[in-house]
Every structure is written in structure tokens, then in C-alpha cells.
Amino acid sequence: MAVQVLQPVSPISTRFPAMAISIGVVVCFVFSAWLGSELLSPIELWQTLSNPDSVMRTLILEWRIPRVLTAFCVGACLGMAGVIFQGVFRNPLAEPHLLGSASGASVGAAIALMLPMLLPGPFLLPLLAFAGAWLTTLLVVSLARLARVESGFGLILAGVAIAALLTAIRGLIMLTLSDDAVSLQVILSWTLGAIQTPTWQEFFVFMLLTVAGFICCLRLARGLDILGLGSDAAKSMGLDVSKFMHRAVLVAAAVTALAVVWGGLIGFIGLVIPHMMRWWLGPRHHRLMIFSALGSGAALMVFDGIARSIMPPAEIPLGLLTALLGAPFFLFILIREARR
């Protein structure tokens, strides 16, 4: 395997991307907050927000903006997980959806709906979602290694097989909950991808968890840079490769579980945006992690806004929209890697 040389990063080389991404995030936020079942002109929007008695103002401030910010956090989690999976497995095809982590988290969350008495509600669902994401990722990697196929295709095949099995398990859970319309609707929305609409208090909890996950991901950046040089080189530089990979998978599973709890199964965001950022910014994982989180969050805000506004008052499942972008991009990467 060719050794990847990491060149020093100058402040000038990061100044323009930082400015461009920052402006892009703000523009995407405003655009997504503007989109909805009822589109207002800029003047009407300003008049609405300036009127404290307006029903539309309450709708925007108490419903639309928290949802837009939640979409940003979900996208950021998926982007960070994608960077970690691609770095740990040194595989451009690795991402939470394709490795089955997201499916595992959704099954864990579905099981939580069947076992509400084991733990208090606020704790059971995220814990089982995390356990499902982590165990699924470890199972996929173990199967690929047992088959002695550690290439990208081996991981993807194992991920597809496990995801299919988890889909069947989730279907059985949905059948057992067929008399519980509320729980059934929650699982269905997770399956198709749908950003939850939280209260401001719920959003702040989610935001704090996302920030904690972001900090943990950043702490992995240097190890991912070293791992990118190859396992032998990483060991010679003092990195405990096995321990580091295990810790990185745990962190990626945690942020994946966060994304699934609040957004359901949303594929390809963790694949497309990290790839674009890697092409643009290079392989250094510290800035790659930051810009992938921002870019993925911005992209998901726009997708969520489009999903809310195309067929009002109904919403298009968010997972369908991301698949329209991600599936062709995935095929492009697959063909490119096969030709190497």
C-alpha cells in the first residue's frame, strides 16, 4: 500500500475553505428555515417575525427553526461517523448506512419501544440505539475478516448482508407492534428517514450530545492521520492500532446512534460529503472532521427543507431524497475503485 504523506497545512490554505463553509452553512440555514408548506417572500418573512402576535412567527420560532437545527446536528453526526469509518478502515466506501451501523441503531431503538419498563424512557432508547450500532459494526468487520476479505468490497458485502437481516428483524418488530399505531409510526418514520421536531429543551440536550461527540471525534484525528500511513508504520510510531480502531468504532457508533434517534435511516450523507471534503481539503483528519461535520449538517438542512416543501402538507421521506444524490455517487466511487 502506498504511504500517504501528510503535508503541513498553512493558515492561508484553510482560510478560504473556512470562510466558504461558514457562509454556506448560514445560507443553508436561512434557506431551510424559509422552506415549508407556506413560502413567504423576504419582506413577508420579516414582517411575520417582527409581529409577536403572528401565528406564523410562533410556527417558525417554535417548530421550524428547532427542526432545522436538529437536521444540522443529525447531518454533522453522520458526516463525522463517515470520516471515522473511512479513516479506520481506509476504505472510501465505508459509511454508517452501508456498514449497517444505522440499521443496527434503528433496530435497537425499535426494541426500546417494546421494552419501556427496563429503564426510564429518556435513557433506554439512546442506549439500545448505541448498542445496536456498535454491535452491528463489530459484526460486519468480524465477518469480513473471517472471510479473509478486508477490501472495500468485502466490508460492503458484509454490511449489505447484515443490513438485510436487520431489516427483517425490524419488520418482525413492526408486526408485533401492529396494534400500537404510535410506536409503529415512529419505527416507520425511522426506516424512511425523518427529522424529529423537538422542543427547544430537547434540542439543547441533543446539541450538547452532538458537541460532546464532536469533541470525541476530533480527539481521534491525529490517530486517524497516523493510521492512514499504514498499520506497520502506525505501530512503529507507537500507535496501538487494535485499541485505537476499537475506540474509534465506539465513537462512530455513538454519533451514528445519535443521528438515528433524531433522524432515522438517512443514507449516503456520511459517504458523499466526507468524500467531497477530502477531495477539496486533503487527507488531514482534523480539518476534514470539522468541515465534514459542517458540510453534512448544511446539506441535510437543505434536504429537510426540500422534503417539507415539495408536497405540502405531506413530507417526502428524507432518506429517499438523500438516496437520489448518494446512490449515483456511490456507484461512481465503486466503479472508480474497481478500476484501480
Image (cartoon, grey):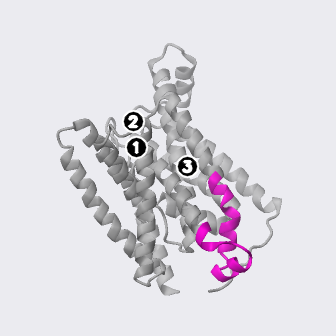
Image position of 262 (left or right of 248):
left
Mark number, residue 297 = 3
The boundaries of the magenta stretch are 216-244
Pointers 2 and 1 in contact (CB under 8 A)? yes
Mark number, residue 125 = 1
Determine whether the residue tagged by mark 2 lies in a helix, strand or loop.
helix
How many residues crowd mark 3 within 10 Å: few (<14), some (14–19), many (20+)? many
Q: In the rendered view, would you say 122 is above or below 96? A: above
Image quarter where the N terminus lies is: bottom right
Which residue: 41% across, 50% down? 129
Residue 93 spot, x, y in % from top left: 49, 71
**Mark 2 → mark 3, Cα distance in angstroms:** 27 Å
How many residues crowd mark 1 within 10 Å: few (<14), some (14–19), many (20+)? many
For mark 2, what is the residue? 121
Q: Nearer the viewer, residue 238 or 94?
A: 238
Residue 257 spot, x, y in % from top left: 46, 51
